[in-house]
Amino acid sequence: MARIVKGGLIQASCPEPSSSSVEKIKKVMIDKHVALIAQAASEGVEVLCLQEIFYGHYFPAEQETKWYEMAERIPDGPTTILMRELAKKYKMVIIPPICEEDMTGVYYNTAPVIDADGEFLGIYRKHHIPHCKPGFWEKFYFRPGNTGYRVFDTKVGKIGVYLCYDRHFPEGARILGLCGAEIVFNPSATVAGLSEYLWRLEQPAQAVANQYFVGAINRVGWEEPWRIGEFYGQSYFCDPRGQMLTVGSRDKDEIVTAEMDLDMIREVRQVWQFFRDRRPETYDPIIDL
């Protein structure tokens, strides 16, 4: 019997002005996503991933202490608690990336992973933190992640998470595959003119190299007043052969869904024996250089 899992990705714009209070921005975006999560449930989605820092703007477009207020504790903060309730209500695995406060004044760019019964399974903290033009000043806010590259055993399968800029580094993607990931989600915030040409290149290549499914999420629209570029959407699922299963629109709030046959992973790995033919004893220069 085939192991068919229906996945969903939410790409969304933030309609609230960045000049509003952090509290208001978060409420608007959380309310928006609660409705979209309900819609995803009505469409039969079993595992759902939201975009990077889903409950607000991509605030690292500037360096401003106001945005420290976005941070919440995990798992005891209000957003994680709400997402646990929704996961249990809809019997859906949910990955809702937020800004995490680990201790007073120490923040991470973090994705909690919540199982379909509402159980909090743990977190992935973004390892690779960009600090570059135009307007990706994440080192002002976040420490580099320290969780390792975790694979979570959920009710729909083994799930890995990579966060945005992480996708440019193949080493962690390989570790997720070696640790048994069947689906790897990459919640992102990326703009046209910077990385769009890589968007449909890197992650399908990782899916092929590591022989798992990938769900890549990008927000949509322009965010004022920064206008660092257009968040171009086009969230997608691809399979272990690197083939696109579904691709979202460029400029619309949308739930992008796909049915994934996890048995394909075995089929592909029996053809392309990449893991069998690895030579880890020859890879020391990756660490040493």
Image (spheres, rainbow, N blue to C red):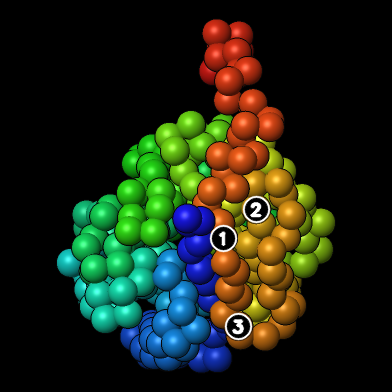
Q: Answer whether residue 105 is visible to the viewer in this image.
A: no
Q: State how far apart marks 1 and 2 are (Cα).
A: 8 Å
The residue most toward the front is 1
- The spot of residue 152 in percent (x, y) is 35, 48
Q: Which residue is mark 1?
A: 260
Give the alpha-carbon distance from disc 1 to disc 3, as whole Å: 19 Å
Disc number for residue 238: none
Secondary structure under the numbered disc 1 in the rendered image? strand
Quadrant of residue 266 in the image? Answer: top right
Q: Along the horizontal axis of the image, is 113 left or right of 57?
A: left
- Amino acid under label 3? Glu
Whether residues under marks 3 and 2 lie with C-beta atoms below 8 angstroms apart, the answer is no
Report the residue at 57% width, 43% height from top: 265
Query: In the rendered image, which residue does mark 3 sit on?
Result: 254
Mark drawn on residue 239: 2
Q: Could you tell me which residue is drawn at 46 percent across and 43 percent down? A: 181
